[in-house]
Image: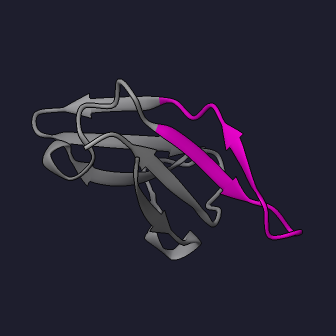
């Protein structure tokens, strides 16, 4: 599996209650095999079930607060 590391700064505020990460579908595929992991204080990763939204050629990963983490996906 391939991975993409992201930081808190990569999130953009989409409305008053949520933040989002934006990727092109060509970068991470269509989302069927995406695994989203949050970096813990211990330095380990834990899997989170973040909502995904698709629009045209983009995938948006939604969360209530920005966090450090990574996306695992099939190429």
For the point 42% across and 31% down, the residue is 52
Residue in the foreground of this view, choosing between 63 and 45: 45
Could you tell me how many numbered marks the image carries? 0
For the point 38% across and 43% down, the residue is 73
Which quadrant would the C terminus be assigned to in this image?
A: top left
Side of 39 relative to 35 (left or right): right
Q: Classify 59 as above or below 7.
A: above
Q: Residue 34, how many percent across, how many down?
A: 43, 36
Q: Residue 29, how many percent across, how many down?
A: 23, 38
For the point 33% across and 31% down, the residue is 31
Identify the magenta region: 35-51
Q: Residue 70, how many percent across, how many down?
A: 53, 58
Residue in the foreground of this view, choosing between 7 and 44: 44
Residue farthest toward the top in the current orientation of the protein: 32
Q: Quadrant of residue 69?
A: bottom right
Q: Classify 70 as above or below 43.
A: above
For the point 86% across and 69% down, the residue is 41
Q: Quadrant of residue 67?
A: bottom right
């Amino acid at each position: 599996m391939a991975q993409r590391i992201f930081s808190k700064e990569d999130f953009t505020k989409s409305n008053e209650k949520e933040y989002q990460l934006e990727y092109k579908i060509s970068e991470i595929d269509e989302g069927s095999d995406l695994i989203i992991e949050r970096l813990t204080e211990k330095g380990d990763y834990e899997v989170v079930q973040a909502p995904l939204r698709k629009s045209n050629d983009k995938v948006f990963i939604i969360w209530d607060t920005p966090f450090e983490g990574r996306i695992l996906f099939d190429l």
